[in-house]
Image: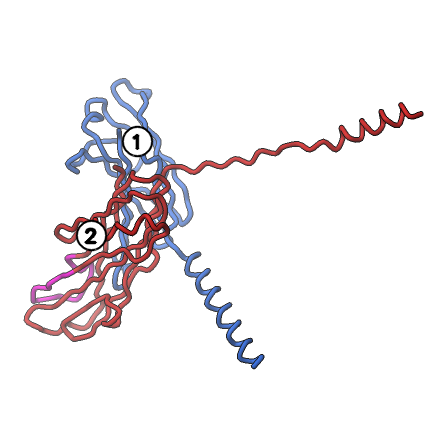
């Protein structure tokens, strides 16, 4: 009887450990702030904001930045890199510049994970997070 | 003598006075997309690939964590083409559906009924702060019931979190 109880406890422990491992293996994508605020930059007629990207996806090394209007049409903008290379668990803060005349049309700042074709086995999940300019 | 003792006791009491150590934290408004399970296609018949459990597949599961209620929309788009596959001659028919698999708050129980579906995209209004798990059932059927050629097939599901 004691042996059966021991096996049951061991099984429960193994399931709990498997659960913890699965949770720890979670892959996440995060971008903040949700509602970025723009301020004047060192160039007249150009506004800037600072965005922060966190890569907790070990299957993703690149994130593409995009700015869109309310109809999801692209809006011109400038960042150091439009395709950011990020290591696993790396946080990157980047400045994003938009012309004052384009800012009124800009609604979303988005980051999208770029999956490498050869890394996708069966089904892959691309994540995209968009902050809203209010 | 009593006065001296009183002064010493008062000094000791001052020395053991507790100091408050402030511990601060900041929870930022944010949306976090977590790919809990990437999903696997099963091959129940030669001309079908499906992530349904009954077909031997594994459903892809995406978790959305939001820290501010009523500020985000979740958009999940199921694939309508393979990102890589052997050469295919026939037209592939794609079907996909997304459902709420699990929630962290009872207030999220209405998400499934309130979802909006168009084309291959399903939108959910995330009105409650917390975590929501979404699963997707995907299937691809080769034209004229012809068997899929042997090889590796991959497709990509897109999970989006849009600030409102």
Asked which quadrant contains residue A93, the reply is: top left
Judged from the image, the secondary structure of the residue bearing numbered disc 2 is: strand
Magenta portion: prevailing SS class: loop
Q: Quadrant of the C terminus of chain A?
A: top left
User: Is B68 colored magenta in this rendering?
Assistant: no
Q: Quadrant of the N terminus of chain A?
A: bottom right
Labels 1, 2: front one:
2
What x and y, as percent, mark residue A94? 35, 34
Query: Against B54, is B70 above or below?
Result: above
* Towards the viewer: A46 or A13: A13
Q: Determine which of the numbered discs, if any, sits on residue B137 in the image.
A: none
The residue located at (25%, 64%) in the rendering is A122
Pick out the residue farthest to the left: B144
What x and y, as percent, mark residue A76? 20, 31
What x and y, as percent, mark residue A73? 15, 36
* Towards the viewer: B6 or A106: B6
Asked which quadrant contains residue A18, the reply is: bottom left
Left or right for B17, reference B91: right
Query: Against B139, is B2 above or below?
Result: above
Residue position marked by numbered label 1 in the rendering: A96
Judged from the image, the secondary structure of the residue bearing numbered disc 1 is: strand
Where does the magenta region start and end? B80-95
Q: Colour of chain A?
A: blue
Question: Could you tell me which chain the residue with mark 1 belongs to?
Answer: A
Pick out the residue farthest to the right: B1
Q: Determine which of the numbered discs, if any, sits on residue B77 in the image.
A: 2
Query: Which chain does the red colour mark?
Result: B
The residue located at (86%, 26%) in the rendering is B6
What x and y, as percent, mark residue B159? 26, 50
């Amino acid at each position: 009887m004691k042996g059966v109880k021991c096996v049951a406890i061991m099984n429960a422990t193994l399931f709990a450990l498997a659960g913890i491992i699965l949770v720890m293996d979670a892959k996440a994508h995060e971008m903040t702030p949700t509602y970025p605020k723009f301020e004047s930059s060192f160039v007249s007629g150009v506004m800037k904001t600072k965005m922060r990207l966190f890569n907790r996806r070990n299957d993703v090394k690149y994130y593409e930045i995009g700015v869109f209007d309310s109809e999801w049409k692209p809006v011109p903008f400038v960042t150091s890199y439009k395709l950011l290379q990020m290591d696993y668990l790396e946080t990157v803060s980047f400045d994003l510049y938009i012309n004052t005349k384009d800012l009124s049309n800009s609604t979303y700042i988005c980051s999208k994970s770029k999956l490498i074709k050869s890394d996708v086995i069966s089904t892959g999940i691309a994540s995209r997070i968009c902050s809203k300019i209010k | 003598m009593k006065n001296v003792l009183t002064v010493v006791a008062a000094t000791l009491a001052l020395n053991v006075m507790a100091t408050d150590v402030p511990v601060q934290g900041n929870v930022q408004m944010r949306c976090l997309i977590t790919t809990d399970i990437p999903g696997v296609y099963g091959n129940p018949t030669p001309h079908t690939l499906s992530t349904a459990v009954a077909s031997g597949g594994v459903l892809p599961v995406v978790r959305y964590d939001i820290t501010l209620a009523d500020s985000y929309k979740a958009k999940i788009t199921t694939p309508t083409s393979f990102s890589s596959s052997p050469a295919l001659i026939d037209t592939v028919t794609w079907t996909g559906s997304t459902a709420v698999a699990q929630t962290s708050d009872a207030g999220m129980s209405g998400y499934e009924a309130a979802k909006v579906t168009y084309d291959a995209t399903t939108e959910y209004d995330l009105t409650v702060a917390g975590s929501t798990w979404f699963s997707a059932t995907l299937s691809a059927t080769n034209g004229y019931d012809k068997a899929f050629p042997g090889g590796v097939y991959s497709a990509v599901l897109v999970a989006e979190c849009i600030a409102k």
